[in-house]
Amino acid sequence: MSAQDALTSSFAAYDAGSGFERMGIELQASFELTSRTALFLGVEHSQLLSDAKDSPISFEDSQTEISTGVLFRF
């Protein structure tokens, strides 16, 4: 975010460098119900690193995501 952009927002100017944005772990599983259908479950946890963590628009340093669904095979 440039200094000019910061003037029109509630955030401070910030110049992010390069590097890794985040690191985390993800687990996925599927459970076969029939030969054509299955249930899906995924869990992911990640942590912001370095400049992404220090950014004024980053409110949380970590996040957890849970996803689920039904898979159909055609």
Image (cartoon, rainbow, N blue to C red):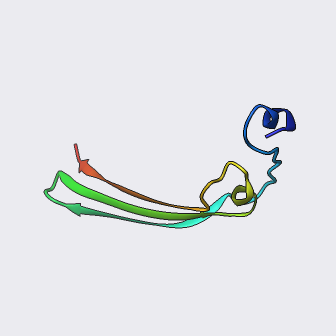
Q: Residue at x 79, y 45 (%)?
A: 12
**Quadrant of image for the C terminus:** top left
Q: Is residue 13 left or right of residue 24?
A: right
Q: Position of residue 8 (x, y in %)?
A: 77, 31
Q: Nearer the viewer, residue 21 or 28?
A: 21
Q: Position of residue 10 (x, y in %)?
A: 72, 40
Q: Is residue 73 left or right of residue 21?
A: left
Q: Nearer the viewer, residue 4 or 68?
A: 4
Q: Position of residue 64 (x, y in %)?
A: 47, 61
Q: Which quadrant of the structure image shows residue 9?
A: top right
Determine whether 22 is above or below 14 in the image.
below
Q: Nearer the viewer, residue 74 or 39?
A: 39
Determine whether 69 is above or below 27 in the image.
above
Q: Residue at x 15, y 59 (%)?
A: 33
Q: Is residue 41 left or right of residue 34?
A: right
**Quadrant of image for the N terminus:** top right
Q: Residue at x 40, y 63 (%)?
A: 43
Q: Which quadrant of the structure image shows residue 20?
A: bottom right
Q: Residue at x 23, y 47 (%)?
A: 73
Q: Position of residue 72 (x, y in %)?
A: 23, 47
Determine whether 9 is above or below 27 in the image.
above
Looking at the image, how many numbered discs can be counted on the residues? Answer: 0
